[in-house]
Amino acid sequence: MNFENFKFGIGGRYAKFWDLTFLYPDWDINQFIPYQDSEEYFDTIRQYLREDTEEDFHDGDILFIGSTFETRQYYGFATVINNGTDFQSGEYPRMDTPGVYYSEAVEEINEFWREFEGQDYFDEDWIERLKDRGVYSPPTAKEKWKSLLPMVKGMSKTRKQNEEVLTEYFPSGVADKISRLSVFGKSSKLRSVDSDIKYLKSIK
Protein backbone atom coordinates (compact mmCIF):
# COMPACT_ATOMS: atom_id res chain seq x y z
CA MET A 1 0.00 0.00 0.00
CA ASN A 2 1.27 3.45 -0.90
CA PHE A 3 1.08 5.91 1.98
CA GLU A 4 2.77 8.75 0.09
CA ASN A 5 -0.44 10.82 0.17
CA PHE A 6 -0.29 10.73 3.97
CA LYS A 7 3.30 11.84 4.36
CA PHE A 8 3.39 14.12 7.37
CA GLY A 9 5.15 17.02 5.68
CA ILE A 10 4.28 19.80 8.12
CA GLY A 11 7.22 21.83 6.81
CA GLY A 12 7.27 23.31 3.35
CA ARG A 13 9.04 26.52 2.40
CA TYR A 14 8.16 30.15 2.87
CA ALA A 15 8.30 32.26 -0.29
CA LYS A 16 10.72 35.17 -0.30
CA PHE A 17 10.06 38.63 -1.68
CA TRP A 18 12.58 40.40 -3.90
CA ASP A 19 12.53 43.95 -5.26
CA LEU A 20 14.48 43.78 -8.54
CA THR A 21 13.74 47.25 -9.89
CA PHE A 22 17.38 48.20 -9.24
CA LEU A 23 18.10 46.26 -12.44
CA TYR A 24 16.34 48.98 -14.45
CA PRO A 25 18.74 51.98 -14.58
CA ASP A 26 16.03 54.67 -14.73
CA TRP A 27 13.67 53.24 -12.14
CA ASP A 28 14.36 55.95 -9.55
CA ILE A 29 13.49 58.56 -12.16
CA ASN A 30 10.55 56.93 -13.94
CA GLN A 31 9.00 54.71 -11.25
CA PHE A 32 7.61 52.57 -14.09
CA ILE A 33 8.99 50.59 -17.05
CA PRO A 34 8.56 52.28 -20.44
CA TYR A 35 7.28 49.74 -22.93
CA GLN A 36 10.19 50.31 -25.31
CA ASP A 37 12.61 49.29 -22.54
CA SER A 38 10.65 46.33 -21.21
CA GLU A 39 11.99 43.51 -23.40
CA GLU A 40 15.63 44.29 -22.65
CA TYR A 41 14.84 44.83 -18.97
CA PHE A 42 12.98 41.54 -18.65
CA ASP A 43 15.88 39.72 -20.31
CA THR A 44 18.17 41.33 -17.75
CA ILE A 45 15.98 39.98 -14.96
CA ARG A 46 16.10 36.46 -16.41
CA GLN A 47 19.85 36.65 -16.68
CA TYR A 48 20.08 37.85 -13.08
CA LEU A 49 17.91 34.98 -11.87
CA ARG A 50 20.16 32.48 -13.61
CA GLU A 51 23.42 33.94 -12.37
CA ASP A 52 25.18 32.59 -9.31
CA THR A 53 24.47 35.55 -7.05
CA GLU A 54 24.19 35.91 -3.29
CA GLU A 55 20.42 35.63 -3.71
CA ASP A 56 18.89 32.18 -3.85
CA PHE A 57 15.75 32.24 -5.97
CA HIS A 58 13.19 29.44 -5.79
CA ASP A 59 9.93 28.68 -7.54
CA GLY A 60 7.10 30.53 -5.86
CA ASP A 61 9.18 33.49 -4.72
CA ILE A 62 7.58 36.85 -5.47
CA LEU A 63 9.38 39.60 -7.38
CA PHE A 64 8.58 43.25 -7.82
CA ILE A 65 9.81 44.23 -11.26
CA GLY A 66 7.59 47.22 -12.02
CA SER A 67 4.91 47.57 -14.67
CA THR A 68 4.75 49.16 -18.11
CA PHE A 69 1.46 50.75 -16.99
CA GLU A 70 2.65 53.99 -15.43
CA THR A 71 -0.34 54.37 -13.12
CA ARG A 72 -0.75 50.66 -12.32
CA GLN A 73 2.39 49.59 -10.56
CA TYR A 74 0.31 47.06 -8.59
CA TYR A 75 0.64 45.00 -11.79
CA GLY A 76 4.39 44.97 -11.30
CA PHE A 77 4.67 41.74 -9.32
CA ALA A 78 5.82 38.42 -10.75
CA THR A 79 6.34 34.85 -9.55
CA VAL A 80 9.57 32.87 -9.95
CA ILE A 81 9.20 29.69 -12.05
CA ASN A 82 11.26 27.03 -13.84
CA ASN A 83 13.54 26.11 -10.94
CA GLY A 84 14.35 29.71 -10.13
CA THR A 85 15.45 30.68 -13.66
CA ASP A 86 12.46 32.59 -15.03
CA PHE A 87 9.41 34.54 -13.94
CA GLN A 88 5.73 34.82 -14.74
CA SER A 89 3.96 38.13 -14.52
CA GLY A 90 0.31 39.12 -14.69
CA GLU A 91 -2.13 41.49 -13.09
CA TYR A 92 -1.40 39.96 -9.69
CA PRO A 93 1.28 37.59 -8.36
CA ARG A 94 0.48 33.90 -8.57
CA MET A 95 0.57 32.24 -5.17
CA ASP A 96 -0.10 28.60 -5.90
CA THR A 97 3.30 26.88 -6.01
CA PRO A 98 2.96 23.49 -4.25
CA GLY A 99 4.65 23.32 -0.86
CA VAL A 100 5.22 27.09 -0.71
CA TYR A 101 3.63 29.36 1.90
CA TYR A 102 3.24 33.10 1.60
CA SER A 103 2.65 34.66 5.01
CA GLU A 104 6.18 36.07 5.31
CA ALA A 105 6.17 37.39 1.74
CA VAL A 106 2.77 39.00 2.33
CA GLU A 107 4.13 40.90 5.32
CA GLU A 108 7.22 42.01 3.39
CA ILE A 109 5.18 43.07 0.35
CA ASN A 110 2.76 45.04 2.51
CA GLU A 111 5.65 46.84 4.18
CA PHE A 112 7.21 47.53 0.77
CA TRP A 113 3.89 48.74 -0.65
CA ARG A 114 3.22 51.06 2.27
CA GLU A 115 6.50 52.81 1.51
CA PHE A 116 5.77 52.85 -2.22
CA GLU A 117 2.03 53.65 -2.30
CA GLY A 118 1.13 54.46 1.30
CA GLN A 119 -1.13 51.44 1.88
CA ASP A 120 -1.10 47.66 2.16
CA TYR A 121 -1.05 45.63 -1.03
CA PHE A 122 -2.86 42.66 0.54
CA ASP A 123 -6.00 43.51 2.45
CA GLU A 124 -7.59 41.28 5.08
CA ASP A 125 -9.99 39.66 2.62
CA TRP A 126 -7.10 38.68 0.36
CA ILE A 127 -5.18 37.22 3.28
CA GLU A 128 -8.25 35.24 4.37
CA ARG A 129 -8.54 33.78 0.86
CA LEU A 130 -4.90 32.69 1.02
CA LYS A 131 -5.59 31.03 4.36
CA ASP A 132 -8.66 29.29 2.98
CA ARG A 133 -6.57 27.93 0.10
CA GLY A 134 -3.98 26.60 2.56
CA VAL A 135 -1.10 28.61 1.10
CA TYR A 136 -0.71 31.28 3.78
CA SER A 137 1.15 29.19 6.36
CA PRO A 138 1.82 25.48 6.84
CA PRO A 139 -0.53 23.44 9.01
CA THR A 140 0.61 22.85 12.56
CA ALA A 141 1.50 19.36 13.74
CA LYS A 142 -1.84 19.27 15.54
CA GLU A 143 -3.81 20.20 12.41
CA LYS A 144 -1.97 17.81 10.13
CA TRP A 145 -2.19 14.88 12.54
CA LYS A 146 -5.88 15.48 13.16
CA SER A 147 -6.63 15.54 9.41
CA LEU A 148 -4.49 12.52 8.51
CA LEU A 149 -5.13 10.18 11.40
CA PRO A 150 -8.61 8.97 10.36
CA MET A 151 -7.34 8.15 6.87
CA VAL A 152 -4.27 6.41 8.21
CA LYS A 153 -6.41 4.33 10.55
CA GLY A 154 -8.72 3.36 7.74
CA MET A 155 -5.91 2.16 5.49
CA SER A 156 -3.35 0.75 7.90
CA LYS A 157 -4.46 -2.87 8.26
CA THR A 158 -1.25 -4.71 9.06
CA ARG A 159 1.61 -4.19 11.45
CA LYS A 160 3.97 -3.76 8.50
CA GLN A 161 1.81 -1.01 6.98
CA ASN A 162 1.49 0.59 10.37
CA GLU A 163 5.26 0.69 10.74
CA GLU A 164 5.53 2.30 7.29
CA VAL A 165 3.35 5.14 8.49
CA LEU A 166 5.05 5.63 11.83
CA THR A 167 8.67 5.18 10.83
CA GLU A 168 8.97 6.16 7.19
CA TYR A 169 6.46 8.96 6.76
CA PHE A 170 6.43 10.57 10.17
CA PRO A 171 9.51 12.48 11.40
CA SER A 172 11.35 11.11 14.39
CA GLY A 173 9.69 12.08 17.64
CA VAL A 174 6.56 13.49 16.03
CA ALA A 175 4.23 10.93 17.59
CA ASP A 176 5.48 11.70 21.08
CA LYS A 177 5.25 15.44 20.46
CA ILE A 178 1.69 15.23 19.18
CA SER A 179 0.81 12.96 22.06
CA ARG A 180 1.77 15.74 24.46
CA LEU A 181 -0.30 18.24 22.47
CA SER A 182 -3.42 16.10 22.98
CA VAL A 183 -5.09 17.19 19.77
CA PHE A 184 -8.56 15.87 20.53
CA GLY A 185 -8.74 17.11 24.09
CA LYS A 186 -10.10 15.47 27.21
CA SER A 187 -13.74 16.27 26.56
CA SER A 188 -13.87 15.04 22.96
CA LYS A 189 -15.86 11.95 22.10
CA LEU A 190 -12.90 10.88 19.99
CA ARG A 191 -10.17 8.95 21.74
CA SER A 192 -7.20 10.93 23.00
CA VAL A 193 -4.03 11.20 20.95
CA ASP A 194 -2.29 8.89 23.40
CA SER A 195 -4.96 6.28 22.70
CA ASP A 196 -4.79 6.89 18.96
CA ILE A 197 -1.05 6.35 18.89
CA LYS A 198 -1.48 3.23 20.99
CA TYR A 199 -4.21 2.11 18.58
CA LEU A 200 -1.95 2.59 15.56
CA LYS A 201 0.90 0.72 17.18
CA SER A 202 -1.36 -2.17 18.16
CA ILE A 203 -3.00 -2.81 14.78
CA LYS A 204 -2.36 -6.36 13.58
Image (cartoon, grey):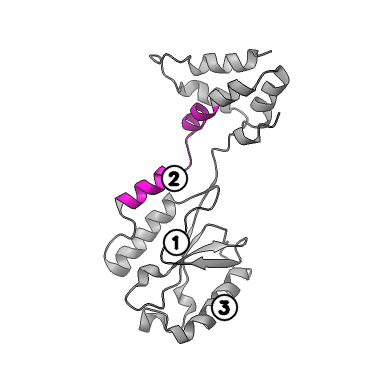
Q: Which mark is residue 133?
A: 2
N-term mark: 2 or 1: 1
The amino acid on which the numbered mark 1 sits, given as a three-letter code, is Pro
Choose mark 3 or mark 1, whichever is in front.
Answer: 1
N-term mark: 2 or 3: 3
Can you say which quadrant of the picture contains the N terminus? Answer: top right
Image coordinates for residue 26, horizontal then vertical, percent:
42, 84
Residue 31 as seen in the image, left or right of residue 178: left
Image coordinates for residue 166, horizontal then vertical, percent:
64, 25
Residue under circle 1?
93
Q: Judge whether 109 appears above or below 25 on screen.
A: above
Q: Which residues are magenta?
A: 125-148
Q: Is residue 111 magenta?
A: no
Tell me the quarter of the picture where residue 161 sits. Answer: top right
Residue under circle 3?
43
Choose mark 2 or mark 3, whichever is in front.
Answer: 2
Residue at 39% x, 69% y is: 75
Secondary element under disc 2, as helix, strand or loop, is: loop
In depth, the one of 56 and 125 nearer the eye is 125
Secondary element under disc 3, as helix, strand or loop, is: helix
Crowd band around label 1 with a 10 angstrom C-alpha radius: few (<14), some (14–19), many (20+): many
Residue 179 as seen in the image, left or right of residue 4: left
Q: Judge whether 55 appears above or below 31 on screen.
A: above
In depth, the one of 39 and 175 nearer the eye is 39
Secondary element under disc 1, as helix, strand or loop, is: loop
- The answer to whether the residues at label 2 and label 1 have Cβ atoms under 8 Å apart is no
The amino acid on which the numbered mark 3 sits, given as a three-letter code, is Asp
Using the rendered image of the protein, determine whether residue 23 is visible from the camera's viewpoint: yes
N-term mark: 3 or 1: 3
> Please, which residue is most extreme toward the bottom here?
36
Tell me the quarter of the picture where residue 151 sits. Answer: top right
